[in-house]
């Protein structure tokens, strides 16, 4: 595999202006931006969070710059900076592609951040950062290969082998959420073709079936009432048949989507992240529901909750630098 198709946790090329034992990670989310400072061993030194200036590109740059300054002021030294972001930087154009925070798309985000921060930075998709964090010192730290899944407002994924992110020549490796739902059901009332329209413009993307908003939409359509994901889970625990049927449909769709990934990537460990990863029944039902679709005689699947929960993304951004090579 060519080096241009992978992203190491660090490289000596384009190092920051001064060496430090401080790693700074920034997680750019749709509603909030989090920043964290880690020492060489991954211990947390500082943390800050501010609302995301939605639909304002220049304010987003300013907010990230402010957060980095706050971390460095608290820690008393300059650090390396890694950024977890929605979408990715296109290797072809050098601009943001595929971000559901659409005000970033088409912008030279990494170039503008380097200018604003006055140093080199590392950027990776937020799901990639999640996967990297859980691979380095999280739920999958002993595994050679890890698929990290984000099940939240959207649906993303990251591939890691030997603590190394797999990006691909187009920078889109792990974007399983924008493939069609495999093995779709054809029979009413739960027919899955052509599927809901996704924000990307296509119909039936996995993200449009298994994300948090997709779960809530499915319940509203079937039960003729609206509520949140946690409320659906609570209703099911209290014996509501419509809520349970909604969770069953969601688990089936997620199982089929993950089975497709296993048939292509065959990871040792799958780690679930995002808000829906807190639903305990997924770890109980997904292995059995995935098994019929796995093209192997061994159907064993190791699916785990994240060690760091919501912090995995921002920690993974910090881990984009290897201080031993700075």
Image: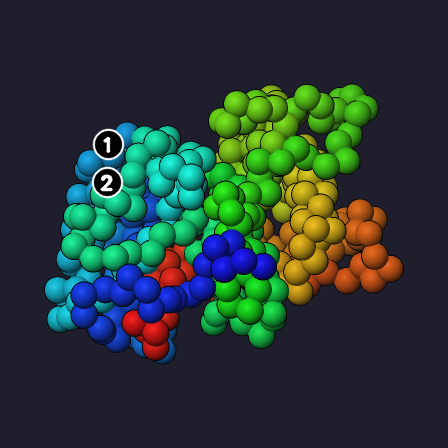
What is the crowding at mark 1: few (fewer than 14 residues within 10 Å), some, or many (at least 20)?
few
Outermost residue on the front side: it is 2
Residue under label 2: 60
In this view of the protein, which residue sits in the foreground, 278 or 146? 146
Q: Are marks 2 and 1 in contact (CB under 8 Å)?
A: yes
Q: Quadrant of the C terminus?
A: bottom left
Residue drawn at the location 74% of the way across and 51% of the way down: 263
Q: Count the numbered circles shown.
A: 2
Would you place residue 242 above or below residue 326 in this image?
Answer: above
Would you place residue 317 above or below residue 113 in this image?
Answer: below
Rounded to the nearest whole Å, what is the CA distance between mark 2 and mark 1? 6 Å
Residue drawn at the location 60% of the way across and 70% of the way down: 144
Residue 154, given in percent of the width and then of the height, sits at 49, 39
Residue 71, given in percent of the width and then of the height, sits at 19, 62
What is the crowding at mark 2: few (fewer than 14 residues within 10 Å), some, or many (at least 20)?
many
Whether residue 249 is visible here, answered yes or no, is no
Residue under label 1: 56
How is the structure coloured here?
rainbow
Outermost residue on the right side: it is 297
Residue 183, given in percent of the width and then of the height, sits at 77, 35
Would you place residue 177 above or below residue 262 in this image?
Answer: above
Residue drawn at the location 18% of the way across and 48% of the way down: 115
Q: Secondary structure at mark 2?
A: helix
Whether residue 298 is visible here, answered yes or no, is yes
Q: Quadrant of residue 236?
A: top right
Q: Secondary structure at mark 1?
A: loop
């Amino acid at each position: 595999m060519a080096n241009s198709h992978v992203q190491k946790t660090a490289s000596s090329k384009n190092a920051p202006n001064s060496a430090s034992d401080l790693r700074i990670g920034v997680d750019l989310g749709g509603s909030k931006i989090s920043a964290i400072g880690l020492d060489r061993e991954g211990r947390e030194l500082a943390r800050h969070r501010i609302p995301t200036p939605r639909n304002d590109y220049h304010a987003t740059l300013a907010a990230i710059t402010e957060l980095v300054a706050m971390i460095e002021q608290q820690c008393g030294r300059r650090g390396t900076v890694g950024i977890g972001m929605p979408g990715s930087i296109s290797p072809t154009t050098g601009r943001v592609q595929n971000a559901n925070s659409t005000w970033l798309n088409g912008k030279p985000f990494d170039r503008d951040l380097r200018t604003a921060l006055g140093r080199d930075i590392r950027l990776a998709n937020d799901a990639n950062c999640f996967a990297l964090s859980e691979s380095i010192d999280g739920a999958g730290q002993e595994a050679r290969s890890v698929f990290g899944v984000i099940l939240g407002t959207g649906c993303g994924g990251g591939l890691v082998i030997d603590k190394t992110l797999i990006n691909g020549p187009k920078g889109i490796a792990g974007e399983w959420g924008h493939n069609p739902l495999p093995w779709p059901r054809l029979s009413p009332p739960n027919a899955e073709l052509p599927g809901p329209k996704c924000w990307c413009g296509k119909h039936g993307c996995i993200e449009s079936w298994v994300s948090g908003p997709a779960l809530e939409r499915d319940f509203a359509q079937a039960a003729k009432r609206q509520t949140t994901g946690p409320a659906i889970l609570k209703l099911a625990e209290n014996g509501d048949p419509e809520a349970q049927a909604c969770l069953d449909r969601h688990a089936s769709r997620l199982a089929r989507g993950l089975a497709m990934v296993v048939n292509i990537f065959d990871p040792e460990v799958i780690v679930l992240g995002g808000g829906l990863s807190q639903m305990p029944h997924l770890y109980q039902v997904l292995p059995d529901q995935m098994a019929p679709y796995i093209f192997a005689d061994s159907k064993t699947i190791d699916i785990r909750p994240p060690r760091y929960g919501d912090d995995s993304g921002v920690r993974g951004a910090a881990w984009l630098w290897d201080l031993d090579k700075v």
